[in-house]
Image: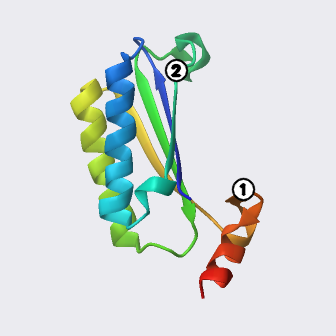
């Protein structure tokens, strides 16, 4: 169950932009990292611009994507490709603003959903 959090500081996104970001990041998770699209969760957040600073200055536009996946399920090459293509997606939407993409790996026994860890799901599938 991959989880993607997209935090955007700047102009308010239109509903179509939010849907586009959600769908395209799910597509990347599926095509690049081999994740199941129907189990991929995406949250787009838009905090007030004053809450994000860079070098003590409020950010005009900044984007942070944090993709959480189960540890040891993807190669370094796959993760690098995901970061590269996600950055390309963000540049298509936001231009050349300040953007970060992070792939965070959590041990299978340390996270899950619906009351079961990813490790218990892995063991049950085997």
Residues at marks 2 and 1, CA–CA distance in whole angstroms = 27 Å
Residue at x-position 54% and y-position 61%:
69
Tag 2: Cα neighbours inside 10 Å, few (<14), some, or many (≥20)? Answer: some
The answer to whether residue 58 is visible is yes
Residue 73 in percent (x, y) is at 50, 74
| Picture layout, residue 28 above or below residue 99 | below
Give the residue number, with chain letter if any, for mark 1. Answer: 114
Q: Is residue 126 left or right of residue 60?
A: right
Farthest residue to the right: give it. Answer: 115
Residue 46 in percent (x, y) is at 52, 20
The answer to whether residue 96 is visible is no
**Of label 2 and label 1, which has the lower sequence position?**
2
Residue 15 in percent (x, y) is at 38, 19
SS at mark 2? loop
Residue at x-position 31% and y-position 43%:
24
Closer to us: mark 2 or mark 1? Answer: 1
Numbered mark located on residue 95 in the image: none
Numbered mark located on residue 46 in the image: 2
Residue at x-position 72% and y-position 56%:
114
């Amino acid at each position: 169950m991959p989880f993607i959090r997209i935090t955007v500081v700047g102009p308010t996104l239109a509903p179509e932009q939010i849907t586009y970001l959600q769908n395209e990041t799910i597509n990347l998770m599926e095509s690049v990292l081999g994740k199941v699209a129907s189990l991929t969760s995406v949250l787009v957040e838009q905090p007030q611009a004053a809450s994000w600073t860079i070098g003590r200055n409020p950010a005009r536009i900044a984007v942070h994507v944090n993709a959480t996946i189960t540890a040891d399920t993807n190669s370094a090459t796959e993760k690098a490709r995901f970061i590269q293509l996600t950055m390309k997606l963000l540049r298509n939407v936001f231009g050349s603003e300040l953007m970060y993409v992070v792939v965070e790996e959590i041990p299978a026994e340390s996270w899950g959903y619906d009351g079961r860890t990813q490790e218990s799901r892995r063991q049950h599938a085997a």
